[in-house]
């Protein structure tokens, strides 16, 4: 200890962490995104970033929002700036039920828990269901933020195969049976049925009941994460899993993609008993979600044409998706394959043998294009030939330019591989932490 | 499972939770506040609530805030409504360092992590340091929200005695030695040195170095929670523990009491290596704190007289504290003792033998006064003769009336005890969940 009054210099440069012996075991699974290290470079304006998941907010009506939020503080400031309940503002929970009805869900506001983004809902679900070593089923690849939460609670992720029609029911059944044979009982299936992050595919309507049946039969809870469900490019929606099974599905929703991510307002809809546990867990995590933000969203929903806004978003993203798919078709070297999303933010690209997308990333950034390498979306070190390409944030022109640059990087990489039979600097790694800011 | 298309009725009335076998072990420690059950009654306008910790926001300059926040959206909406970094907005972290300097802390913005209220900081600290069964030291009584987080991570709380000068150094040393003799190594001491919640006492300046020495000597980290430090009624501040030891203290701060609780903006200041772990943990919990709220606080700090606002708050709370202490002096039956806070929100009252404050609470609410019973502030079922009385929210007149009613309830209770030798309906319980909304 230092004597009172004096303050030692910051110890950032010290290589030894004096707290090392104190950390919880869970911290072993907490690893920084390798993209983060490159962030300072990747965020330079000359780099086209296809890495992040930042929504295209330029479509928002800032002027009328500004007036609405100002008025909220002037007229209801004493409520908006005060603590609220851990479960969330009742009027917002009612509006959330109206939104979920668009995907066939009939729910009561009592069973909705508002959270700080749906990431917090995911974290709370994991908190109440997962002991260390418990098995969680998830698509392979899966959302990097979900893998981060599962790791924080020391759950073991078992990936289940997807194809272009989403999660494969037979693969799910097999994964459950295998786990049970090993003496494990999977706690839940975590799934993103619509416009998957990062895979860009959607669970076929005809598979949905089957997947619910498999989970019910084996007493595996379903966590349905649906941030993109209203962002189908032709305005099509799919029946939510929750609309088909109210007892065995916890549904997670978000305003981050349909309104504004910086407000961090999401929610969970859960069977009644689970909802009670979620509220208690949320209380210990943040006491309550920000009242202010909940009222901003609530006012926005009641005073703005929010469905029109979603349509505006959809059209912007469709244009960008088109730009990306067109450029991929035009520029990508033979042997590359990719998914063709009908909604959401992401294309999942598989490179030919010989490419390690993580090792290639620094070289791509040197060539002024960034992406998210595939290993971050697996808990088991797969994904080294894959990458996630986001079309949500850059303009169509920038997307085309980015894909062109990326294609050149891949060509060089493949050329090296053909010449030497390998590419220097290979390594694989575990899940990356989520990094929505690396746009 | 139900067939697709149909939806079963809500199962709120079912007594059997079908998910019961699925919950994580930690959920056993998650219990609802008994106050919550009484909330519908306790929040009726005719009830004077001395139970909650809601700040007195009426002092806020809503009109200029309204203009400022409206302008923020109009001019910087695309940033304010977008994802940000998990660590928080850089300009706010700089301003936070200026605020901490008021209590003698010299810190770098790089070591600050912005969180969703300091509750989240507390939860993240527990997440990175506590495995199930780890020992955490905390004052007895301690903040109910901290006990909630400790329970969520299955830490074992060992309470350390306080007196009117705060945590007793000898008791701390003894608690550590006893734990070590049992083969445990306490992970950290959680302490609220200034204007303690719920005890209303402040750690004497001359004890601070000693407590830091004891912790350093036994390699116990210190978590310094300081939401009330700037709310000393005479404007006095105390040197933060962090100002005396930058290596072994994680400091938690909050804007909930000095500005507005409904924005949920708090922070942690941590040694560099710990800070890195905190950011990773925070990322898995919420991705990032709301950008919007951080910019609202940042603008408020740079455009408003925030020190003047704190002075306004201080004066309001001093007046309320005076009202409460005066009324306690005037009305309380002999044998009651209570603390005399020089800042913050709370008085801690000890009733004479024969009173069980938890059992008495429903009767108090019938008599139109509410408080927080003492057992909620202990992890070990102590506190049955204690209660926390908050003077932060009701007006001085209401406080006086509430204390008068409470004194009558206590008189009746003691009369019963004197007549029958016991009071019916006794029970004790473990920690309650935090309930800031039960004002």
Image: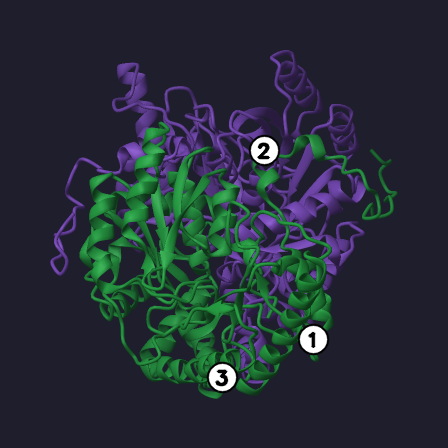
Chain colours: A purple, B green
Closer to the camera in the image, B371 or A335: B371
Q: Is residue B185 visible?
A: no
The structure residue drawn at horizontal position 20% and vertical position 41%, both measured from the top left corner, is: B217
State the separation of the CA atoms marked 3 and 2.
Answer: 45 Å
Q: Viewed as shown, does residue A298 lie left or right of B135?
A: right
State the separation of the CA atoms marked 1 and 2.
Answer: 38 Å
Mark 1: give few (<14), some (14-19) or many (20+) Cα within 10 Å: many
Give the label, 3 or 2, closer to the camera. Answer: 3
- Name the residue carrying label 3: B323
The structure residue drawn at horizontal position 15% and vertical position 40%, both measured from the top left corner, is: A14
Q: Residue B25's mark?
A: 2
Q: Please, which chain is the residue tagged with disc 3 on? A: B
Q: Residue B368's mark?
A: 1
Residue B60: image location, x then y, percent = 46, 83
Q: Viewed as shown, does residue B206 lie left or right of B13?
A: left
Q: Quadrant of residue A108?
A: bottom right
Residue A138: image location, x then y, percent = 59, 30
Q: Please, which chain is the residue tagged with disc 2 on? A: B
State the separation of the CA atoms marked 3 and 1.
Answer: 18 Å
- The first of marks 1 and 2 along the sequence is 2
Closer to the camera in the image, A235 or A141: A141
Q: Viewed as shown, does residue B283 lie left or right of A282?
A: left
Q: State if disc 1 and disc 3 touch (CB < 8 Å).
A: no
Mark 2: give few (<14), some (14-19) or many (20+) Cα within 10 Å: some
């Amino acid at each position: 200890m230092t004597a009172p009054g004096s303050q030692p210099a910051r110890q950032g440069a010290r290589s030894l962490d004096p707290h090392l012996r104190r950390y919880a075991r869970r911290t072993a699974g907490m690893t920084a995104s390798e993209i983060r290290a490159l962030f300072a470079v990747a965020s330079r304006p000359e780099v086209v970033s296809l890495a992040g998941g930042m929504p295209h907010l330029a479509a928002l009506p800032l002027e009328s929002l500004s007036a609405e939020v100002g008025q909220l503080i002037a007229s209801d400031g004493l409520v908006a700036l005060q603590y609220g309940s851990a479960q969330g503002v009742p009027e917002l929970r009612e509006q959330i039920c109206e939104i979920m009805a668009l995907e066939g869900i009939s729910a009561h506001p009592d069973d909705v828990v508002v959270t700080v983004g749906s990431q917090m809902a995911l974290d709370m679900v994991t908190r109440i269901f997962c002991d260390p070593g418990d098995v969680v089923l998830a698509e392979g690849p899966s959302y990097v933020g979900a893998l981060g939460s599962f790791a924080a609670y020391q759950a073991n992720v078992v990936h289940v195969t997807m194809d272009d029609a989403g999660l494969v029911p037979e693969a799910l059944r097999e994964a459950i049976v295998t786990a049970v044979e090993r003496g494990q009982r999977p706690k839940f299936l975590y799934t993103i049925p619509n416009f998957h992050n990062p895979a860009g595919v959607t669970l076929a309507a005809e598979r949905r009941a089957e997947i619910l049946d498999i989970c019910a039969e084996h007493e595996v809870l379903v966590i349905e994460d649906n941030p993109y469900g209203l962002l189908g490019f032709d305005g099509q929606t799919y029946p939510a899993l929750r609309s088909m099974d109210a007892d065995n599905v916890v549904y997670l929703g978000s305003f981050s993609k349909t309104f504004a991510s910086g407000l961090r307002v999401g929610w969970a809809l859960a069977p009644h008993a689970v909802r009670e546990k979620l509220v208690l867990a949320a209380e210990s995590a943040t006491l309550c979600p920000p009242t202010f933000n909940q009222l901003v969203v609530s006012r926005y929903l009641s005073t703005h044409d929010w469905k029109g806004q979603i349509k505006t978003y959809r059209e912007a993203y469709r244009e960008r998706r088109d730009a990306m798919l067109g450029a991929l078709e035009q520029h990508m070297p033979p042997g590359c394959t990719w998914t063709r999303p009908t909604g959401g933010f992401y294309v999942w690209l598989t490179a030919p043998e010989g490419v390690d997308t993580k090792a290639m990333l620094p070289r791509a950034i040197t060539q002024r294009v960034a992406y998210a390498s595939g290993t971050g979306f697996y808990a088991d070190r797969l994904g080294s030939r894959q990458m996630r390409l986001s079309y949500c944030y850059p303009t169509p022109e920038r997307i085309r330019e980015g894909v062109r640059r990326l294609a050149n990087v891949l060509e060089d990489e493949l050329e090296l591989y053909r010449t030497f039979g390998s590419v220097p600097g290979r390594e694989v790694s575990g899940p990356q932490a989520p990094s929505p800011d690396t746009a």
